[in-house]
Image (cartoon, rainbow, N blue to C red):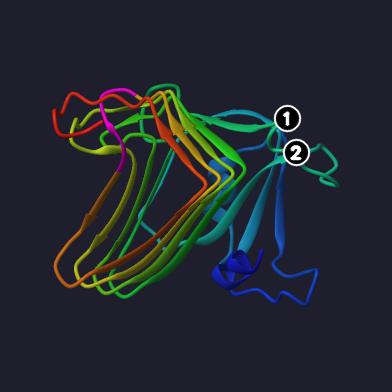
Amino acid sequence: INLFEFQLNSNPNNAASPTAINVLSSGNIATAIGSATAGQVIRVQAGTYYFHYQTFSPKTVMIQGGWNSSFTSRDPINTPTIFDAQNTAEVLYFSSGTGITSNLVLDGVTLTHGKGYFGAFFFLNQSNSIGTCSIKDCKIVNSVSTAAYDGIVNLNHWDSCYSEIYLINTLIASNDSCNGIYNQTTTKSVGKWKIINCTISNNTSTDPTGG
């Protein structure tokens, strides 16, 4: 879609742009993310992948689930791609700063059994950086935050940064000891949000002001 082409700085009139990395069910998602060049799409075969990933380097990358084994068609609803952190840490953790531009897209993946200080998913833009984060057709479920006042999805904007957040057709539900979404926008930062056709439900928090 045009939003993703914009984020990846790709050419919407060229079918070969952006370039893609294909990850089969036997592949390593963390290695694929770590080795991806700016603007690439990581296409992931349907199945369950047990891992958690953390980076402090800027990333402009799209992770897209639900593909068949030949990567000729995808159905993320009936043949989902599941990232399972096995209750050890955040499933995905992205942090960048100091004047960096980063763009992250999650399209058609399920994040589950995250158990980190920042729940299942963490995106931090800081220190005069510019960043966008899009989460479309995803499920973020059955996870826990070890910090009661944070969320299962943490999207933070610190120290004079500029961020744009898009949550589209996404389910954030059945998570424990945390808020569904937590946002923190500090002094001189700008965080712009669009939440479209999402369900945020049945998330419980030990913080009496959360949930």
Question: Which residue is disc 1 drawn over?
Answer: 78
Decide: marks 2, 1 in contact (CB < 8 A)?
Answer: yes
Question: Which residue is disc 2 drawn over?
Answer: 75
Q: Nearer the viewer, residue 183 or 22?
A: 183
Residue 112, x across and y down, in percent: 48, 28
Bin the neighbour count of mark 2 within 10 Å (Cα to Cα): few under 14, some 14-19, many 20 and up.
some
Q: Which mark is residue 55?
A: none
Q: Nearer the viewer, residue 35 or 80?
A: 80
Label 2 to label 1: alpha-carbon separation: 6 Å
Instruction: Report which quarter residue 211 is drawn in.
Output: top left
Residue 47 located within the stretch drawn in magenta: no
In-image side of 171 versus 45 (left or right): left
> Quick one: SS at disc 2?
loop
Q: Is residue 145 above or below residue 153?
A: above
Q: Nearer the viewer, residue 129 or 153?
A: 153
User: Which amino acid does the dot numbered 2 rest on?
Assistant: Asp
Which residue lies at the image location 17% right of the left edge and 73% below the top edge?
Answer: 188
In-image side of 59 versus 169 (left or right): left
- Residue interval drawn in magenta: 176-181
Residue 10, x across and y down, in percent: 65, 73
User: Which amino acid does the dot numbered 1 rest on?
Assistant: Asn
Q: Is residue 194 above or below residue 137?
A: below
Which residue lies at the image location 22% right of the left edge and 69% below the top edge?
Answer: 189
